[in-house]
Amino acid sequence: MKKPAIIIGKKQIIMTCLTLMLAAAVYINYATAPKIGRNDDKPVSADAVDDINYGETEFVNAGADIGADSASDYFAQARLDKMNNRDEAVQTLQTIIGGGDITEDEMVMNALDAVEVSKLIESEGTIESLIRAQGFEDCVAYLDGETAKIVVKTEGLNKAQAASIKDIILGETEVSAENIRIFEVK
């Protein structure tokens, strides 16, 4: 009795590649996330970015009543929510790619969407690491391809620091300066 031949099709190869890319992006995001309570980064001098002007910066204060524990809880919960949302997106893409009656063009479009999500996850992790390297205790980055929203833990954000954060985002993404919003959590 002969064993049946295993046939690996285009769908299986594409799905495997996408799964590996998304897993790598999630791992990079996880690996670059700060450890809670860690504050060993040294601040960079604000004099280096005093002359940079990216337009008007809008500061959004999350409230002066938030204590240190609440701020740490906020960042931990924000990371958890972001990871859960990304996991759901990955699962949805895997379901779409692996199942049913879709054309090859639809599969390619879904694969491109998955690659874009993977790039956004990687960019978020890089931006968060670079902002923490600027001396901020904690931060969370949210990218959607057109806008960037950054939440930083700080006792007060000055224009030089905001310009430095915008410079990091502009260097890592194709988001325009007017679509960058910086939020403060104290």
Image (cartoon, rainbow, N blue to C red):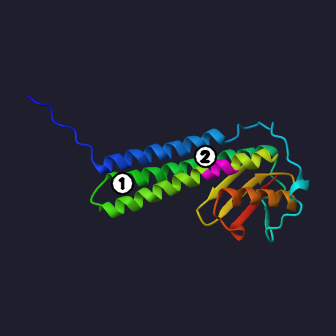
Say which residue label 2 marks.
80
Contact? badges 2 and 1 (CB < 8 Å): no
Sort mark 2 into few (<14), some (14-19) or many (20+) by Cα contacts within 10 Å. few
Q: Secondary structure at mark 1?
A: helix
Amino acid type at circle 1 is: Ile
- What range of the chain is rendered magenta? 123-127
Q: Nearer the viewer, residue 181 or 186?
A: 181
Q: Is residue 49 above or below residue 3?
A: below
Tell me the quadrant of the picture where the N terminus can be found. top left
Percent coordinates x, y for residue 25 in the rendering: 54, 46
The structure residue drawn at horizontal position 70% and vertical position 61%, both measured from the top left corner, is: 170
In this rendering, is residue 34 above or below 164? above
Locate residue 168 relative to residue 11 in the image: left or right: right
> How far from the left and from the top, in percent, is residue 156?
87, 56
**Numbered circles on residues, count:** 2
Q: CA distance from mark 2 to mark 1?
A: 26 Å
* Residue shown at the point (46%, 51%) measured from the top left: 90
Badge 2 amino acid: Leu
Outermost top residue? 1
Q: Which residue is mark 1?
A: 97
> Which of the two marks, 2 or 1, is nearer to us in this view?
1
The mark found on residue 84 in the picture is none
Q: Residues within 10 Å of mark 1 (few under 14, many from 20)?
A: many
Q: Quadrant of residue 27?
A: top right
Residue extending furthest toward the left:
1
Callout 2: SS: helix
Q: Is residue 182 magenta?
A: no
Task: Pinpoint residue 128: horizontal percent, then vertical percent.
Answer: 70, 49
Magenta region, main secondary structure: helix
| Horizontal arrangement in the rendering, residue 9 relative to residue 3 (left or right) | right
The percent coordinates of residue 73 (x first, y second) are: 71, 45
